[in-house]
Structures are given as C-alpha cells and as structure tokens.
Amino acid sequence: MLLVLDVGNTNIGLGLFQGEGLLHHWRVASRREGTADEYAILLRNLLEGVKVPLDAIDAVMMASVVPPLDGTLEEMVRGLLKLTPLTVGPGTKTGMPVLYDNPREVGADRIVNAVATFAQYGGPAIVVDFGTATTFDAVSARGEYLGGIIAPGIGISAEALFERAAKLPRIEIARPRFVIGKNTVASMQSGLFFGYLALVDGVVRRMQQEMGGTKMVVGTGGLAHLILADSETVDRVDPLLTLTGLRLLYERNR
C-alpha cells in the first residue's frame, strides 16, 4: 500500500492507496510544534481505526509547503514505518514543464494539483484550491504549468475581520440565505461567501481570456464544496485531487 501526505499550513491530508484505488483518506490539523512521536501516535491510531497494519504500507509519498514539518514527518515515517518517504521537490519527475520564472518558487501542492488535473481532465485547464491561501493554477493544452494566482484564503480573511475590527465577531463560514445581510453575522457571512464566489468567477474568466479558453476548471480544497457549488465557472469539485496527484507522482518516481 502507498501512503500519501499532503502537508499544508492548516491541515494535513492523508490517503492510503492500493494500486490506483483510494482505500481511506483523512484530514488532520497541521501542528508545527508537533513532534515525530506525536505524529506517529496519530498515524498509528488512524491505521488501527481502519484495521490496516503498519507493515502493509510499503511506500510513502509526501508534498509539503510547511518546511518546519518536513524533518518531523520524515523522522516519523522512518521511525514508525521503517521507510524513507519520497518528497516532491526539485528533481522530482513530474512530466510537466514548469514555465515559472523560478520553478523552485512554486508550491509543491500546486504542481501536484496541476499534474492530477492534466492526467484526469486534460488541458488547457485551471485549478482553484481553497486552502490556507486560495490559489489558481493554469495548465496548457500541452501539459505545461503556466503559472497562477495567490490570494488570501477565506479562513484568513474571516480571522482578519475578527482580529482587526474590534466590534466584529468570529463567525462560522457558511452560505447565507440572502446576499443583503440583516445582522452583523449574516453580513459578514455574505461578504465572505459571495465575495469569494465573485473572486473565483472573476479571476477564472480573466484567466480563460488570457489562455484562449479552457477545457476544464477544477476546484479542490477544504471549503471547495461549500463555495464552489454556486460557481458559474467551476466545472467540477474534486476534494481528493491532491492525493490523486501524489499517487501519480509516486508512480513516475518510484
């Protein structure tokens, strides 16, 4: 079995593959202060919960945008699973030319998403990822990573309102019934929900104009289902896109 780890600033996505089939997947909080032993206990408990023995895992593939956690998680994998993880980075065979001024600046998760999107849906395509940041990535018809856009994530924006505006509360991110709010919470929810919906559709349309059209627009990330269900431009929401991309990259590098 293959274990994949998508290490983000807010969450860590984990997936367990048998061949091309995703057997189990989890999302846990990303804790920079966590130790290798703590993460080992967490992983052991997750595997025990689905009755998968540790020795059933024979490979690990990891992509991380949190450098302080890289060594911790590698230590955990070596100690608990007795394996050396493959990590997405410079030198990884992606099969996708990266047309960025400095390819090393592109987050590993963005490349993984682009690879998975082109493999499953072809190109030209756009990926919208609702993570700690909201990112937009463009893939050409020839399978090249063209570049993209980085905007503050919806969670960051909600926290900024709470922290910087003295009279505004911390709220749940949810779809309000009406655009025009009748109280503070509803007004904030409307601004976040419909504001980010307009951000997605507006940016995607501008990207499509610049790219000369797209074959597919794919959404992913923790809040993608909530926001993108009302989108006029996103064709499909695939919450497991990054995990699938990690499996594909493992197959190209093993």
Image (tube, rainbow, N blue to C red):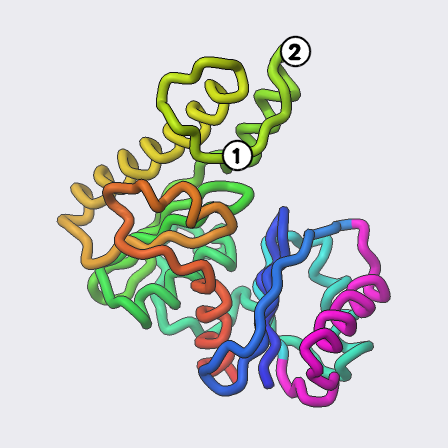
Is label 1 in a helix, a strand or a loop?
Answer: loop
Q: Residues within 10 Å of mark 1 (few under 14, many from 20)?
A: some
The kind of residue on which mark 2 rests is Ala
Amino acid under disc 1: Ile
Q: Nearer the viewer, mark 1 or mark 2?
A: 1
Q: Who is closer to the viewer here, 35 or 97?
A: 35
Above or below — where is 207 with respect to 5?
above
Furthest-left residue in view? 212
User: Which residue is denoted by mark 1 in the rendering?
Assistant: 173
Classified by dominant secondary structure, the portion drawn in magenta counts as helix
> In the displayed structure, does residue 104 sit left or right of residue 126?
right
- Tell me the number on the disc at residue 94: none
Identify the magenta region: 33-59
Q: Residue 21: horizontal and vertical position, in percent?
A: 47, 81
Task: Tell me residue 65's x, y (percent).
Answer: 59, 53
Screen quadrant of the N terminus = bottom right
Q: Which residue is mark 2?
A: 166
